Every structure is written in C-alpha cells, then in structure tokens.
Image (spheres, coloured by chain):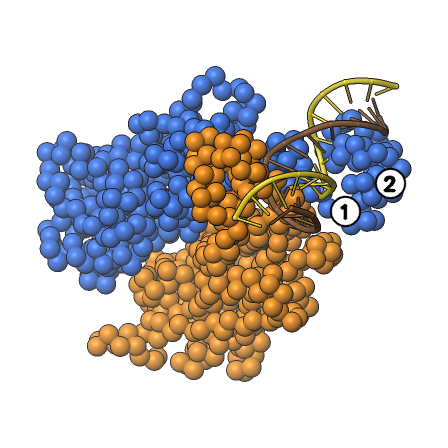
Chain colours: A blue, B orange, C brown, D yellow
Amino acid sequence: MIDIARAAGVSPMTVSRAFKNAGLVSPTARAAVMQAADDLGYVFDSAASALRSQRSDFVAVIIPSINNANFADTVRGLSDGLRARGLQILLGYTDYDVEAEEVLIAQLLRRRPEAMVVTGGTHTDRARVMLDKAAIPVIEMWDLPAHPIGHVVGFSNAAAMGTLVDHLAAIGRRRMAFIGGDAARDTRGTDRRRGFVAAVRRHGLDATRLIDAGPPPISMAEGAAAMADLLERMPDTDAVVCVSDLSAFGALTECQRRGIAVPDQVAVAGFGDYEIAAVCVPPLTTVNPFPLRIGHEAADLILKALDDELPGPTILRVAPELQARASSLGVGQDGRLIRR
Amino acid sequence: MIDIARAAGVSPMTVSRAFKNAGLVSPTARAAVMQAADDLGYVFDSAASALRSQRSDFVAVIIPSINNANFADTVRGLSDGLRARGLQILLGYTDYDVEAEEVLIAQLLRRRPEAMVVTGGTHTDRARVMLDKAAIPVIEMWDLPAHPIGHVVGFSNAAAMGTLVDHLAAIGRRRMAFIGGDAARDTRGTDRRRGFVAAVRRHGLDATRLIDAGPPPISMAEGAAAMADLLERMPDTDAVVCVSDLSAFGALTECQRRGIAVPDQVAVAGFGDYEIAAVCVPPLTTVNPFPLRIGHEAADLILKALDDELPGPTILRVAPELQARASSLGVGQDGRLIRR
DNA sequence: TTGAAAGCGCTAACAA
DNA sequence: TTGTTAGCGCTTTCAA
C-alpha cells in the first residue's frame, strides 16, 4: 500500500480509503490510486484489514453435507443475501456428526466470523459454550430448537411430517410405514420419524412399521433396499413415508422393479421437494421446506443483527408446504389426480 | 495471548508455540498454556497469525455450481486431502459464468490463499493475469486445457463422449441425438457436444441431431422438455446422449410418460455417473469421471506443490470410465444385459 | 479531503 | 526449551 501511495503521490491512508470506496476520497486521488494499483498489480490484503479493523467479513456456515441439493440451495440463499454487503461465506460440513460440528465450530471461530449459521438445534455442550462466548450472532436453521442458542430460521420437522400423514390418511391409507435413518444421528430425520409416529397414532393407526435404513444420509440405493425389506416383511403396507425424497425415489424404483403399482398398491412420499420429486414417474408426493428461502431469511437476519436492529432472539418460521402428487393420489384417464 | 502467557507463567512466544503444536514446547509449559487458554476462553486468532506468518492456511476452490453432486464430491476429496495439513477450503461458485469467475478470483486472492483450484480451462484474460501474478500453485480440474495456467487434474470431455458414442454404435444405434446446453457458456458441455459430433461422424453417421436445451446447467425438467422436442421433430432417433445424467434422467422420464420403450425404441445415455443413474429404472448408461478422485488428486498436487516437490507444471489424467447399463443395452429374461 | 502516528495479535529471527 | 524484539499490512484516531 505504501508503494501504491508513493506511485499515486498520496499517503497510504488515502489508498486505504480509496479501496474502501466510501465517498471520502476525491475523484482525482481515487483515480490515481486505482491506476497505480493496476500498474503495480497490487492485491488488497484482507487479512491485514481484518486484523486492524476487527472485521473479517466472513460469515461461517455449517451444514450437514455439501452433497445435498437442499442445503446447497440454502447456502445459495445465504450467499446471495450476504454478498451485497461484502460478506463472504466460510463453509463447513459435519457429515451429520455433532462431534465433527464441534471441531468445525472451534476451527471456524479462529477466523473471527462476524456471524455463525448452524444447521439444527442439536449441538455438544462445548459447542454451545463456544458459540455463547463468541459473542457473535448465531443462527440455527432447518429446525425449531427447544432451547435456541440465538436466532432461528426454520420449521418443525415433526409437524411437517404430520401434514404428510394427514394427507395419506385423508386419501384412505391405513397401513403406513416409515423409512429413515439411524435415530441417534440425524436429528431432523429423527424428528420426522417422531412426527410420523405421533400423527399415525393420532389417526388411530398402527405406528410400528418403522424401517431403519442405517446412518444418515439415506441414499437412493439405501431407500430401495429399505423398501425391499419392508415389502418382504410387511407386504400389506399401503403407504410409505421416507425421510427424504432421495430415499423415496429409491423406494419408488424398487416398487417398479418388483412390479408393484404406485400408488394403487402402495403410496410413496418423501420430504424435501428435490427436483427429482417433480420429474420422476409417477411424481412424488413430498413436503417443500423452501431451502432457498431459509437461506435468504437467515442472511436478512444476519444483516439486521450486525446492524443491531434485532431487539432480541428472533424465531422465524418458514412454513413447509405439502406437495401432493401422483405417487400418493393416482392419476385418472383424463390426467387429473384421483383419490384411491 | 499476552493474557494467556501471564496466566500460564510463560512468555507469549511459548503460548504461540504451544498452539502450533510443534514439539518445541515442554509438556509442562504446554499443559499450563492449554489450561490457561481454556480457563480464559481464549480463541486463537488466525487472521493475526496469517498476517505475520504470511500463511493463510486457505486454499481457494472455484466450482461452477454448489448444487451439483459431482462437484460436491470433488470438493469433499479436496477437503479431505487438505484437512490433514490444516488447510481450509475457501469455496466459490460461478454459476457457469467466466465473468463471475473473474470477480470471484479477484475476491478470493485478497484472502491470500496458498493455492487456487479452478474448474475447466476457460477463463478471462484478466483472470489468467491475476492467477499468474498471484504466484501460488494453480490447478485447473475437470478438463485438459490446451493452454494450462499451472497444474491440471482432469480428462478430455470430448474423448469421454467419444467412448459413449462408440458404445452406442457398437450396439447398433445409427440415429443418435445430443441434448445439451447453450454452446457459448458451459465449456465442458460444449466439449462433450463437440466430442459427440466428431465421434458420430467418425462412424459415418448423421451428426445433426443436436438439441439446444438452453443455458447450463440443464435440469432434469429441461432434459425432459428437450426430449419431448426431439421426439416431435426426429421421431426416428434411436439413441440420445445427454450432457449430464440429470438431463438424461429427465429424458428417460419423458419417454416413460409417452410410452416409448427404453432402450428398445430409443437408448438413453448421460454423463457423470450420478447416483440416480444406477438407481433409476432402467439404470442409465453413462460415463464416470471419478469426481472424488479428482478432488483427492488435486489435494495431493497442492500439498506437493507447497512442498516444492513438483518440478514443473503437472498434467494428471484421471481416465473416465464407461458405465454401460440397461438404458442402452436392454435386459433379458435372465436379468443379463443384451444387445439390440 | 488528506495525512501522521500508533497498534490490531500474532510469529520470524535471533539470542540465551 | 524459552524469551526478546520487531514488524506483517492494514485502519483507527486524531489533527490539519
């Protein structure tokens, strides 16, 4: 910066101001600085800036998996909303492991992010302490934690599953099964299972058809294997709810391979409204949690929190929406959806 | 750090050394430092460390889209390989736009990454100049650029497509079509189209059945729409190659909706070997580019480059593999694949 | 609108 | 194995 200052015939401070593009520098000076910077191939050093100003312009974001279209959409929403303010995302993923999350939080906090976004409300005690002490805005998303750390942008996974079960009950399904992951790890998956069981019982139906498909995330292939298992053990099942659209698609294909009619013999439903749900044949009944909107709202919340415009911890509900499609409803000759 | 030093009864330098966990500190001193740090809730400041040591421990990685399972796998491979050395990924995505890439490169270079990984070999002139001047290891991946900037981990998209066309020709397909994106933007997609045309011509066949499905990435739904278009305009087509498995799956579903038999009437093939290709019915013939391996190899290359163990620019080929499945071959009564 | 002085929190370099 | 000194490249603060 000193070199640029010399070349432009100004002080380093003017160079600094020119790069912050506030209106605090004369157009002449700015032009001279930019010219010199270009000539000398100068690249601004954010680390030095961050150290002195105590503003890193980082927002840390932790998601369970980088390989998931829904979380990717949320990150896009965050990224879009934060970019306008010059905030950059520092991304980490946990592979659905709270211990890994703790390590990640410790690591990311060293970079002095201005805010931290985490997925879900389940964290280790140490993770909670670290986030508390960090004294930065914290946002939990994709859930409605019973004991939030800071702000929240999410929805009740259990309640959303209830909506799906209500739909299946309304179209006459009585022997519903759930395919999901190992209950211990993926808390959102566990919440969905819990919501399934509660809703099925509420309808006075049998809530014991639960297939454990292993540790999350449940892949398409694992969904297919779980469906095979289910069809062997409980062949009279007339509806299957899967923890996500990906496993639901796997389950659907298993039905196709076995010549089992969907939805005539068994209805199939997923969660997430991934693109595949709308495109596959038949299209999948599912629940849209609006991942992009979650990202946008989280970004908004961060910007407001950084501007001290939030009076206290804010809980923002993004209501999921049922997408009833042919995998549960059936399609008539005229192409319109019909009930069983 | 001064506070920790005081509390632990050592100098700040010893605190610094303890946190670098080299074997340069006595176990006693280290324990005292860690205890004090824990008591005081100290969090190491990477920005200050980066400024003084001129080592950011960042590796910048630029991919076209964060919402793509293949690129996500490559990022996982990179992340796994770099984590062991304490290197953290700074991720950016371009939405398949070279201008956006240029902006991103400028932004990321301000963070002083130790290396930069970009996708493909097409960049703006300014981007090339910036990367040159940055004087850090640069890796281009997912392609074999004609004029590499630095190191390369990739494959020829055109050649890989040729393999697919050869396979279709070998099983007797003669009227092949290609579904892909707007030629101007996605260079890997364009290379695949080019490879398709060249290979089809090599077999003495008509290479004019090219469907433009719009700007990349081509979604499942866009693949379905393109297939509908193709079936209307050239109903005698007996094989369709899509720029990716996602569009290929969309095309497959369009055939299912129209009652067109795959592969009997038309073979469908994709690119990428996404999970859906193996799971859908019938499973999709495709090409596996080994995205995770690309990430691992890129990470290896970076570590070697940072250790000055690379004599010069290195070109690492990761050979893609044809995955011939039932969407092109057909399945006999015994479940084994048969030719047409 | 511009500049001078000081210092953010670490670590390189050197010394003991 | 430990400590001292100086300074990384910016920006805050204050003054002109």
- Dot 2 amino acid type: Arg
Q: Earlier in the sequence, mark 1 or mark 2?
A: 2
In the depicted structure, whether residue A87 falls above or below residue B148: above
In the rendered structure, find residue A6 and report the number of the disc placed on it: 2
Of A241 and A180, the residue lying toward us: A180
Residue where numbered disc 1 is placed: A42
Q: Horizontal and vertical percent for residue A300?
A: 51, 29
Q: Residues within 10 Å of mark 1 (few under 14, many from 20)?
A: some
Mark 2 is surrounded, within 10 Å at the Cα level, by few (under 14), some (14 to 19) or many (20 or more) other residues, namely some
Label ID, residue A284: none
Q: Nearer the viewer, residue A174 or A23?
A: A23
Discs 1 and 2 share one subunit: yes
Q: Chain of mark 1?
A: A
Q: Tell me what residue is drawn at x 84 percent, y 34 percent.
A: A11
Query: Looking at the rendering, in which quadrant would you find the C terminus of chain A?
Result: top left
Residue A162 screen position, x and y as percent: 23, 34
Dot 2 falls on a residue whose secondary structure is helix
Q: Position of residue A202 (x, y in %)?
A: 14, 31
